[in-house]
Amino acid sequence: MTVTLADVAARAQVSPATVSRVLNGNYPVAASTRERVLRAVDELDYVLNGPASSLAAATSDLVGILVNDIADPFFGIMASAIQSEIGGPGGRAGGERLAVVCNTGGSPERELTYLTLLQRQRAAAVVLTGGAIEDAPHRAAMDAKLRKLTDAGTRVVLCGRPPAPGTGAIALTFDNRGGGRELTEHLIGLGHRRLGYVAGPQERTTTRHRLEGHRAALAAHGIEEDPRWTVHGRYDRRSGYEAALELLRRDPALTAVVAANDSVALGACAALRDSGRKIPDDVSVAGFDDLPFSIDAVPALTTVRLPLAEAGARAGRIAMGREEPPPGGIASARGELMVRGSSGAPRA
Amino acid sequence: MTVTLADVAARAQVSPATVSRVLNGNYPVAASTRERVLRAVDELDYVLNGPASSLAAATSDLVGILVNDIADPFFGIMASAIQSEIGGPGGRAGGERLAVVCNTGGSPERELTYLTLLQRQRAAAVVLTGGAIEDAPHRAAMDAKLRKLTDAGTRVVLCGRPPAPGTGAIALTFDNRGGGRELTEHLIGLGHRRLGYVAGPQERTTTRHRLEGHRAALAAHGIEEDPRWTVHGRYDRRSGYEAALELLRRDPALTAVVAANDSVALGACAALRDSGRKIPDDVSVAGFDDLPFSIDAVPALTTVRLPLAEAGARAGRIAMGREEPPPGGIASARGELMVRGSSGAPRA
DNA sequence: AGAGGTGTAGAAAGCGCTTGCTGTGACGTT
DNA sequence: AACGTCACAGCAAGCGCTTTCTACACCTCT
């Protein structure tokens, strides 16, 4: 039925061991023999049995990439960068590794289950991207799992995610707090004093950090925050639209709306426009991430650019052991404030 | 070192066979025994060895999803929909399958290599998304590979990709030609007679089909096409920007620009704005796909909506054998013209 | 010419799991 | 009382590969 190593060996008149060695190329094989084997492989159209190979060698070439939402370019960009460094077929890395991205959809259970599945497959490395979930039991479960993975020799890298001390995972985080603060300070600097904030889902680290930065900026400038000025929602456009409307309902005098990310900001812009406000004349808007489409909004979105691709690439290299992990296993990347047309001085 | 089935068996005072059966749950095991085994599994923190299991059972729970560009929401949305039906952990499907997305980056070699890798892993199913590459040798190689996969019992589904006759693959295609034609007819209906076209990469089926639709519309209305009106580029914003500029250079009198997809269209809009043209007063612009951000452009983009999520979900179900393939193994989904602010009558 | 390399190939022992087949008591049947 | 019948558990044979150890030429020195 299916062609096995033994078949190839028979055809090439050598032992299975030799065929295996030719295929793995880590043992001297005479050129003539190699050629004969290769020909047999070709003629029989042999395809290595992955599971058998992984079992015998006790290793696998799988590398897992966990993302919260694969339809969101935020993750897509990171995943793409990671994968290009992992090698994948044709990547710059030599060995052919199967880089696979797993979509958790932001669900804690799925996150855990995917990790188990990768553990089952004896994955060579795992990269977790984006914000973590703040629930304590879940976090403990995750940490335990990560610990087990690293103990088993799987390299674990957190990309754009806070460190997980004691798990052995390398963390490349983004300074969401700093970025959030800088962004809001920019708005305050323009003269805004009544700023609404459309936050992401409650239980995410990213959400919390960005919000903390925002509040730190307010506090630093002696602006007392009104609880009505914060609305939580999802990280999507729709949610931004609704939240902005809600914000306006609560306080029609807001002069600026800061959003949890760019998609949310665009939704907020739409809501503002639909309610007859001009951006930035009536209300300024700011996003976060600087995804490619943000510059095409009209006016273009003021936002914080995160080095998504750079961090992803680095995470990929570290996962492959081709780059030294940062000292202490933790590195933090700063965001860069991108001031564009969506923010301006409030109306006098 | 690592805990094996045998360890669990020893601890639970049963044979390895019994443990395996408890874990796979497809053979009668007394409740008391089962419980004992489960407890042992828990206590020892046992994790099944995936490769060993796949080898022995000669099956695997891997499902591959190939995408051209994971950073592009076009693929992200489809992948997300596919994956949610595949199950992945916690998905609606019962069995836990590892749905993995592989990013080919549009490279023919990578595409092939990923397929080989999936073949090695004895993947349960493979879903290929998006346009195919038109190069004849590559196509032959792909078809041969797909044939081998289906022969080996792997279910192969093409999602948003033209059929591959004789390979045994199920195809869920998009009517790019029809959509392209409808879009251009809309523009012609508004009175446009000089229409530029920013096409995608030459060798893609998607590119060709959309362009054919465009040309069919022109021909149907007796508009003779000027070769200067078509520029090829990549499927990204940047490319759209440059191409639009080039188009304008070649013929400053164009009154409409049709783009290969929404990202390209947004780039074109930016170019038009930067060159001092108003949309749609001076030039109308149209995109394709209706990705979420298209509605946020100002003016909102006229485009063709493709049922990305629906097709993905269906592809996922078919891949899992939970839905009957369409008759003949081929189904085509139509796009829906979305008329928005970016298209209007040309200036008198 | 014999000792010691060196380069290459094979034999065989697993890797950890699944599963067909074979017990083996407990129970129901005639 | 003797005999199927069940429900459940174990034995053991692989699944297809990797890798250690061994074997054998064939050289190269001395």
Image: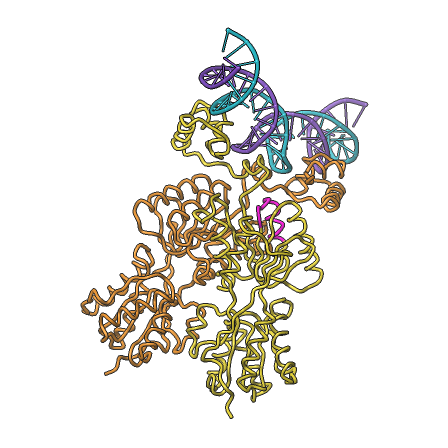
Chain colours: A yellow, B orange, C cyan, D purple
Quick check: is A162 in the magenta stretch?
Answer: no
**Residue B342 placement (x, y as % from top left):** 35, 76
**Residue A173 placement (x, y as % from top left):** 59, 62
- Quadrant (top left/top right/bottom left/bottom right) for the C terminus of chain B: bottom left
Q: Could you tell me if residue A1 is visible in this image? A: no
Depicted B105 relative to depicted A271: above or below: above
Depicted B103 relative to depicted D29: above or below: below
Depicted A250 relative to depicted B260: above or below: below
The image quarter containing residue D13 is top right
The single residue placed furthest to the bottom in the displayed view is A348
Q: Residue at x 39, y 33 (%)?
A: A42
Quick check: is A124 in the magenta stretch?
Answer: yes
Magenta range: A113-125
- Is B275 left or right of A326, judged from the image as shown? left
Which residue is nearer to you in this view: A25 or B4? A25
- Is A245 left or right of B136, judged from the image as shown? right
- Is B290 left or right of A65, judged from the image as shown? left
**Residue A25 placement (x, y as % from top left):** 48, 34
Which residue is nearer to you in this view: A4 or D27? D27
- Quadrant (top left/top right/bottom left/bottom right) for the N terminus of chain B: top right
Q: Could you tell me if residue A174 is visible in this image? A: yes
Instruction: Please state the total of marks drawn on the protein image.
Output: 0
The image quarter containing residue A299 is bottom left
Depicted B35 relative to depicted A173: above or below: above
Q: Residue at x 37, y 65 (%)?
A: B335
**Residue A324 placement (x, y as % from top left):** 57, 52
**Of helix, strand and loop, which mostly describes the magenta segment?**
helix
